[in-house]
Structures are given as structure tokens and as C-alpha cells.
Image (cartoon, rainbow, N blue to C red):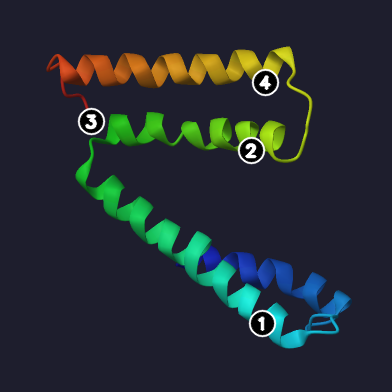
């Protein structure tokens, strides 16, 4: 929660410079979309993320967190049409191999270090 407050304070000067109210011919639609963004992809996602992190080993959580850039890269290529570069592909494959290795180790009852 503190991170959101610090971020809000850091972004406030930019919001004031641009204007605190959205510029739109349909302000009700903008407010509904802002409420959706605040409720679903932000608040709900973080609540579910932290609830899951509380019941999973710390080593697993730290590796699974590495999947966030993988999903961002996939969305950038698939939705935004960004080119798939060799470095992006190599990094994605490395992270997926790491997560797969961790999952296999845990499935075999590997040592718990977290």
C-alpha cells in the first residue's frame, strides 16, 4: 500500500501539469474505465498475487515473478505488433526453462530452501 502512495505522490506534479481532470467529450465513460482499471487489473490482481505469494515457497514466488516480463513480451509481440528480437526470445526461453526446472524439482520433492 505504501508503494502506491509513494507512486501517487511522485506522479502528482505531472498530473497537475497536464490537468487533473481527463480531457474527453465523454467524461462518464472515462470515469467508468478508470474505475475498472483501478478495480480489476490493479487492486484485484495485486490482492490475488499477494494471497498466492503467501502460500507458496519464497523460491517459487521469486522465479514465478520472473514470468511477468515474459507475459509483457508476449503481449507486446502479439497485441502491439512489436518485432520479436533474438534477445527477447532468448530471455523468454531462459526464464521459461528456469520456471520449468523449478517446477520439476518441486514435483520430485526437491530440497526446500525458501
Image quarter (top left, top right, bottom left or bottom right) of the C terminus? top left
Image x and y of residue 18, in percent: 87, 75
Asked if one can make out residue 57 in the rendered structure from this viewpoint, the answer is yes
CA distance for labels 2 and 3: 31 Å
* Residues at discs 2 and 3 in contact (Cβ within 8 Å): no
Which mark is drawn over residue 3? none
Mark with earlier residue (2, 3): 2
Question: Which of the 4 image quadrants contains residue 70?
Answer: top right
Mark with earlier residue (4, 3): 4
For mark 2, what is the residue?
A: 75
For mark 4, what is the residue?
A: 88
Label 4, residues with CA under 10 Å away: few <14, some 14-19, many ≥20: some
Label 1, residues with CA under 10 Å away: few <14, some 14-19, many ≥20: few
Question: Which of the 4 image quadrants contains residue 28?
Answer: bottom right
For mark 1, what is the residue?
A: 31
Mark 4 or mark 2: which is in front? 2
Judge by depth and name the residue closer to the eye, 11 or 70. 70
CA distance for labels 2 and 1: 25 Å
Image x and y of residue 65, in percent: 44, 36
CA distance for labels 4 and 3: 29 Å
Identified at 42% across, 58% down, the residue is 46
Mark with earlier residue (4, 2): 2
Secondary structure state at the residue bearing disc 1: helix
3 is higher (above) or lower (below) than 8: above
Judge by depth and name the residue closer to the eye, 91 or 77. 77
Mark 1 or mark 3: which is in front? 1
Mark with earlier residue (1, 3): 1
For mark 3, what is the residue?
A: 114
Report whether 46 appears left or right of 101: right
Amino acid at each position: 500500500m505504501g508503494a502506491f502512495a509513494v507512486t501517487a505522490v511522485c506522479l502528482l506534479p505531472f498530473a497537475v501539469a497536464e490537468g487533473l481532470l481527463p480531457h474527453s467529450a465523454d467524461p462518464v465513460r472515462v470515469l467508468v474505465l478508470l474505475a475498472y482499471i483501478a478495480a480489476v487489473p490493479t487492486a484485484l490482481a495485486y490482492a490475488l498475487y499477494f494471497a498466492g505469494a503467501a502460500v507458496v515457497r519464497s523460491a517459487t514466488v521469486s522465479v514465478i515473478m520472473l514470468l511477468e516480463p515474459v507475459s509483457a513480451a508476449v503481449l507486446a509481440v502479439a497485441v502491439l505488433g512489436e518485432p520479436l528480437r533474438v534477445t527477447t526470445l532468448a530471455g523468454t526461453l531462459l526464464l521459461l526453462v528456469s520456471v520449468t526446472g523449478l517446477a520439476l524439482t518441486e514435483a520430485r520433492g526437491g530440497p526446500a530452501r525458501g
